[in-house]
Image (tube, grey):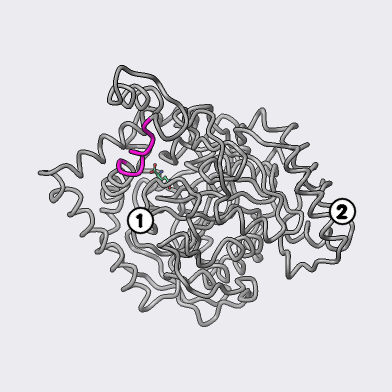
């Protein structure tokens, strides 16, 4: 049952010589063969390349390398189909990229490889990361490992499902408005959106550049802290990456939360919140209080405008970023009589409905005459949202909220109603607009069917250390992280 181990359990075994990197990688490949037909997390994977990387890790181990030098030695880690991995397909779950193969490695891939990880596989997602259920993938929908009639969340649904199905020890995704935290919550794993600027986006296909951030999915908080440390750090190739020291997040773990003040936003316990989610989050808050933290009410009054603001800014940036998919530079091409026809045919056939909707919305809000009324105004509201958080963080160290308003819904339940789909993100998007960090971890389950519920912890800019400390103390005092999905 090698595939069920956490990263820390696996690396301990590998370092002791109790198992090899090849065995760990083979265990993931076997698990994919066994369950992925029912989960559909992977778009593709290259087993030969993964096993070759594993053999290289085993040779390094034989040469006497230490776990300090290679903290992920032999650990299989899979990637969302939006992160460049040299020699492997990169489709962003879209048809428009055709048979595109990445010519280089993203910085996060380099960092994972430097840490000794076996980097493999392309995980399903909503096309160009636009969505909350993976139903916008041009290929297929990823199903929830806890209940295959339900969605796995999105846009990084493949990342969350692969961890919950134990097909990889960790996965790496991207979060523009909740795409790591929301699927992590719905699939019962830990997902981290680091502070804007914490992790390099070099090699990440841009969706909304002022919001996008890369982060990990793991089976527990300790693994999330380790993965975040490996992924983080300054990169001259990403002009938004910050030159801030990267702490050893695991060294900050402390089961005693005395001395911490944690905020509960008045505006987040809204009507419309599923009663089981509400109850689980309230219990989690009480638990965190019993570990010594002081819980205080805070106010984030502009939160109610977060979804409206996001759905102006994100499409605006997307409409500019996606202009590069023109049938000339990358991937698929549908010929036309002239470059304009080629361009419109390629984009017309290559993009799915949601991506087109965002491009049209984004182009509209940026067009002259509407720019001031929508785009500039949204930018101003964004500043108010950020200021709400900075003000709250004058008195609290972190903030607790539900990650999602409901547990995983049925496949198809919201796919015809974009507004309902957008409202899945009410608790997660303000974090991206404010540029702060956030984490989701399991805080319980619904009755029947048994579905995971997520607790979101929001931290100060570069406040990941505190985030992990609270999350780990809570996790270790509750049983949720030990629950296995039925396909594990
Ligand atoms: N669900 C949100 C959207 O559709 C967030 C996506 C993301 O974070 N990539 O835009």
Q: Earlier in the sequence, mark 2 or mark 1?
A: 2
Q: Indicate if the residue with disc 2 has its beta carbon within 8 Å of ligand 1.
A: no
Q: Where does label 2 land, which residue?
A: 19
The answer to whether residue 185 is magenta is no
The stretch of residues the image draws in magenta is 319-326
Residue 267 rendering spot, x and y as whole percentages: 32, 59
The answer to whether residue 324 is magenta is yes
Vertical order, 487 against 235 (above or below): above
Residue 453 rendering spot, x and y as whole percentages: 54, 49
Say what secondary structure mark 2 lies in.
loop
Going by the image, does 485 lie left or right of 460? right
Q: Where does label 1 land, which residue?
A: 210
Give the mark toward the camera: 2 or 1.
1
Residue 476 rendering spot, x and y as whole percentages: 66, 65
Residue at (20, 44) in percent of width and height? 366
Going by the image, does 284 lie left or right of 240? right
């Amino acid at each position: 049952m090698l595939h069920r181990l956490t990263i820390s359990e696996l690396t301990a075994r590998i370092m002791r010589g109790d198992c090899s990197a090849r065995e760990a990688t083979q265990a993931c490949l076997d698990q994919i063969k066994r369950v992925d037909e029912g989960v559909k997390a992977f778009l593709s994977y290259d087993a030969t390349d993964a096993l070759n990387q594993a053999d290289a890790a085993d040779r390094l181990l034989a040469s006497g390398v230490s776990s300090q030098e290679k903290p992920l030695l032999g650990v299989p880690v899979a990637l969302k189909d939006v992160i460049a991995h040299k020699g492997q397909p990169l489709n962003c779950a879209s048809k428009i990229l055709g048979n595109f193969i990445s010519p280089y490695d993203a910085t996060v891939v380099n960092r994972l490889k430097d840490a000794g990880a076996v980097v493999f596989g392309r995980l399903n997602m909503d096309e160009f990361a636009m969505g909350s259920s993976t139903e916008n993938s041009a290929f297929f929908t990823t199903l929830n490992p806890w209940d295959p009639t339900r969605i796995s969340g999105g846009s990084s649904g493949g990342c969350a499902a692969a961890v919950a199905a134990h097909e990889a020890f960790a996965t790496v995704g991207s979060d523009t408005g909740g795409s790591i935290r929301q699927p992590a919550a719905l699939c019962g794993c830990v997902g981290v959106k680091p502070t804007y600027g914490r992790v390099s986006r070099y090699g990440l296909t841009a969706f909304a550049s002022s919001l996008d951030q890369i982060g990990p999915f793991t089976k527990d908080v300790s693994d999330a802290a380790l993965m975040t440390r490996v992924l983080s750090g300054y990169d001259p190739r990403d002009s938004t990456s910050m030159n801030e020291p990267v702490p050893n997040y695991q060294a900050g773990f402390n089961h005693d939360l005395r001395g911490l003040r944690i905020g509960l936003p008045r505006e987040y316990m809204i009507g419309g919140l599923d009663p089981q989610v509400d109850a689980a989050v309230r219990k989690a808050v009480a638990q965190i209080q019993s570990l010594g933290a002081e819980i205080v009410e805070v106010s984030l009054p502009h939160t109610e405008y977060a979804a409206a603001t996001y759905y102006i800014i994100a499409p605006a940036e997307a409409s500019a970023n996606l202009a590069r998919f023109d049938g000339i530079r990358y991937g698929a091409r549908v010929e036309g009589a002239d470059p304009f026809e080629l361009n419109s045919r390629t984009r017309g056939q290559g993009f799915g409905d949601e991506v087109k909707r965002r491009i049209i919305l984004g182009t509209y809000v940026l067009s002259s005459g509407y720019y001031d009324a929508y785009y500039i105004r949204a930018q101003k509201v964004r500043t108010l949202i950020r200021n709400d958080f900075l003000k709250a963080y004058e008195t609290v160290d972190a903030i607790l909220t539900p990650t999602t308003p409901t547990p995983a819904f049925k496949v198809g339940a919201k796919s015809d109603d974009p507004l309902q789909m957008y409202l899945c993100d009410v608790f997660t998007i303000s974090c991206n607009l404010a540029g702060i960090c956030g984490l989701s971890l399991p805080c319980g389950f619904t009755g029947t069917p048994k579905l995971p519920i997520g607790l979101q912890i929001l931290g100060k800019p570069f406040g990941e250390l505190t985030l992990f400390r609270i999350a780990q103390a809570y996790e270790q005092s509750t049983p949720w992280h030990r629950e296995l999905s039925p396909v594990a």
